[in-house]
Amino acid sequence: MKYDFNDIEAKWQKYWADNQTFKAENNSTKPKYYVLDMFPYPSGAGLHVGHPLGYIASDIYARYKRHQGFNVLHPQGYDSFGLPAEQYAIQTGQHPAITTAENIKTYRRQLDQIGFSFDWSREVRTSDPSYYKWTQWIFIQLFNSWYNNDKDKAEDISELIQHFETEGNTKLNAVCDDDVEEFTAEDWNGLSAEKQQQILLQYRLTYLAETEVNWCPAFGTVLANDEIVNGVSERGGHPVIRKKMTQWSMRISAYAERLLQGLEKIDWTDALKESQRNWIGKSVGASVTFNVLPNVTSSAVEKPHKIDVFTTRPDTIFGVSFMTLAPEHDLVLKITTPEQKAEVEAYIEATAKRSERDRMADVKTISGAFTGAYAEHPFTKEPIPIWIGDYVLAGYGTGAVMSVPCGDQRDYDFAKYFNIPIPNIFEGVDISEEAFADKEKTIIANSDFINGMNYKKATKRVIYELEQIGQGEGKTNYRLRDAVFSRQRYWGEPFPVYYVNGLPQMIDTKHLPIELPEVEKYLPTETGEPPLGNATVWAWDTDKNKVVSNDLINDKTVFPLELNTMPGWAGSSWYFNRYMDANNPDEFANKEALDYWQDVDLYIGGSEHATGHLLYSRFWQKFLFDKGFVPTDEYAKKLINQGMILGTSAFVCRLQKKVVVTDKSLLKEEMKSNNWLKAVEASQIDTFDLLSDKIVVSNYLSSFNEFKKYRRSKGIEESDIKLLTSIDFNNFVTNQLKRFIPDEYLKYASTDNYILSFVKDFIHADVSFINSSNELDIEAFKNWRPEFKDFEFILEDGVYKSPRDVEKMSKSKYNVVNPDDIVADYGADSLRLYEMFLGPLEQYKPWNTAGITGVHSFLKKLWKLYADDNGLKVTDVTPTKDNLKTLHKTIKKVQEDIENFSFNTSVSTFMIAVNELTAQKCNSKEILEPLLVLISPYAPHIAEELWEKLGNSESISTAPFPEFDESHLVESSKNYPISFNGKMRFTMELPLDLSKDEIEKAVLENEKTQEQLQGRTPKKVIVVPGKIVNIVG
RNA sequence: GCAGGAAUGGCGAAAUGGCAAACGCACUCGACUUAGAAUCGAGAAACUGGGAGUUCGAAUCUCUCUUCCUGUACCA
């Protein structure tokens, strides 16, 4: 019997599918366990070997939990709306639904062949109307809710209306827009229905408002803050500009504090929690109101202007020597004096021109302008000049700061630059060079009623005093902004919204889903409307309650529908709940199912979702929890970020034409102070061109590691490495490259006085041309591209060894490894084992296909334990003590490893076990049968096959995990390491039941001990029974 | 700048206070084979980034420096 992995794997994959082996039950007496992978986007490129890493880990855990007797929910599906399918549609005219379906098919085939234990009966696709029906439903729930700060939860909008009707909004403690006006119950009741709707929008958890958005012209859509990195789009790196647009937004800021606090009770990685904390950006301080002093331009009747600022350092209020507003601040033009107008306007224009990116890149240049206006200090009543400067961000806090140059470096730099006074309000601190920002060491001085106080006391007192005069209060500020929820794209969830007189109306939930309409083109319309503006059947008929032709719009019974679609994160913000009851047509998930499964026990995925998906989904979960739709307000108890698998790129090293000639003696001098490259530059005496620019040299001296080896073999000092590389290269050059050197320069190549340095460049070679010893298939490389056809290879021992480097896996680097090939050549079990064997799950690690032979031959060895050419070898023979010891130490280690997610070490443990059992010639079923259960989460196909061969008729996935029995590991003696002053010198076999004293006696009597001591008396003897003996002295 | 993580053979790594380098790749030699692949056997190498401390004993704990990676950044 041979280990025919291809047949075995196909057989069991079919068996699992036919028998629905991994279907999870919603009614079970077993304890539940929910293992989830982060939602994949089915891209057209398919999977590379890096993608399944997390899926394999979660699959091992899911299978392990089944062996432990849990009812395991391990679903999979697709986050199938998104930009790439739409970009492809724009280019080719193919409907995104078609390409998406094709991509999913490829994905599914690739996933299936790796042997995952997914419950495919629960598959979801965000682009499927039966799914996005419920995304639309949640949107409507958000629209119909507001956030009650007193109860600290979301409530139904009807309760808000009731409040307005009886008390207005004066005593209301709700989260709302900044510019809400106060009104009484009478005011409210007197308002038109339209006006009431407009006011309610300022409170709804999803709302339509004109907001400044990040517009990406290349994509023709807005992007959320987390989709922008360094001022350009995360995808594609396109420029992003600020633009005012009417958009749907999500009032996630209402949940800022709970999102922050919730991190305390979930077992997610610290790095991830930390980035969420940074993103939420809580700062505690005070808001302070400064009154602007009237000047000639403000007429007497006009209300005096006020500037609100937020500060985390109210204790430094007496150090304020100016104020700075963001150039975009509303008040700027209103307060600027005529004398300063020209300068201020010029400055505003100049900053507006600078892109967000320039502004971020250039933080050193200080710029600003004086408005000519003054504000009054709330306590001293002194006038404070008001400046504008682009170091103050319009989007944070109030877009204005009280500048305390002695306590803030940015204010300090600004003050220095514009010659603004820098009063010192710190006791015993020198501020002549820089600002003093250390809160802990602060003692306040020159500050009236807070002199001598520390930061904490002074802060408290200042806030109290501000409240007394009505010019401030304690305040907590969050960096987290409301999330823009509209996208000007086609391939996303349509909003269940139509417009009556420009005001948004929700379609009744019983008419959902509102399906995506057909369009001719996926581009924006000529009038600049989103792609849905191309749809001809896209109007809502309120009588028939269906989508009808645009021609019928009469604004009485037929109204236009929303043209934006939802962003990518809409569907992924709640999918984990849908899996609990994935096929329910009447509810997003049934209450019983939700109560049974509760939450995700283990969530595995990449860290790139830290501030996007993982924050938005926590927000939606908390909202659904507030409204009583889900039983928990955090949906994932534990989260692990798997590391990325990197590619090992291969290169050929080509000599550039230019050769630098250096005098060796000069170079040695230069080397003393400079690095090698600089030294060569500095001591160069001549340069010339090679006769060819198509020379490829062996990596022998082009890779540093190879060189280290070489150095050792010649006994060359470390410090001379670089120098000698070059000299040796020179000799090599003399022999091999002579014919490429012009005659008049040959003199340099043939004497020892000169060093020739070649400029090199490295060209990516496809990794499939490289064998396990890094040797390049030169013919394949030459035939790969016409421009490589006549490359001259200078070989070393007849082969070309490619330099390798670790990089991200990508097509452009020709280092992508497709799991299909690995599965075909070695099988899914080998792939699974190898991915785990590479290293710790969370770590970044390079893929090197050559190494897979190790785990593959392990599987063959495993097979041979059970079967050989004559058939099954396993018998009922009683196991030996050694057999049992091997089995039980394996059980113990593997169980510990899985529970610690240390999958790489359990693969090693299996190898050790198989090596030992092979050496022991173990045939015992009592050993070999439980061993299969241990291995089955990792290599399920071979385990099933051998399990069946041993006479079992049920799938191995139903077998209980073997019980660890300590008694098999009990030893009667221990080979003690005997150390002298901490250094191990020899070992000594001693019975384990000896007492400390007996051990000490036995060791001291040993002649080797006496030899080590050479007559000295030990000062101290440390005996740790069962571990070590250390003799000091 | 700030935050988080890391540094151990040629490579991936293991050891979490007690015999550093288990396990695997690559390498060398040998066996088998017409040959290659595969398989089996044997072997070599390298002392934990630097410095200090705690300890009988440190890769592991503490301090410090260096380097690298990841995230984030005019956040008042």
Image (tube, coloured by chain):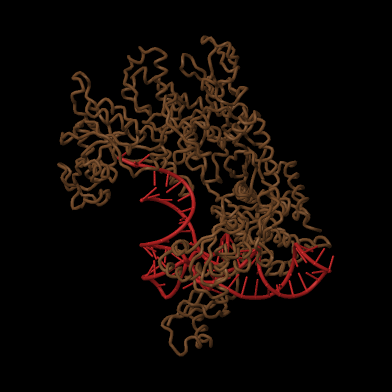
Chain colours: A brown, B red
Q: Nearer the viewer, residue A203 or A839?
A: A839
In the image, taking residue A189 as reference, residue A660 lies left or right, namely right
Residue pushed farthest front? A744
Residue under the point 45% across and 90% down: A1015
Residue under the point 67% across and 39% down: A120
Q: Position of residue A832 (x, y in %)?
A: 66, 52
Q: Position of residue A235 (x, y in %)?
A: 53, 39
Q: Point out the image quarter for the C terminus of chain A.
A: bottom left
Residue A43: quadrant of the picture: top right
Residue A312, placed above or below residue A956 = above
Q: Point out the image quarter for the N terminus of chain A.
A: bottom right
Q: Position of residue A771 (x, y in %)?
A: 68, 59
In the image, taking residue A956 as reference, residue A125 lies left or right, namely left
**Would residue A318 be seen by someone viewing this image from the given angle?**
yes
Q: Nearer the viewer, residue B56 or A223?
A: A223
Residue A34, placed above or below residue A370 = below
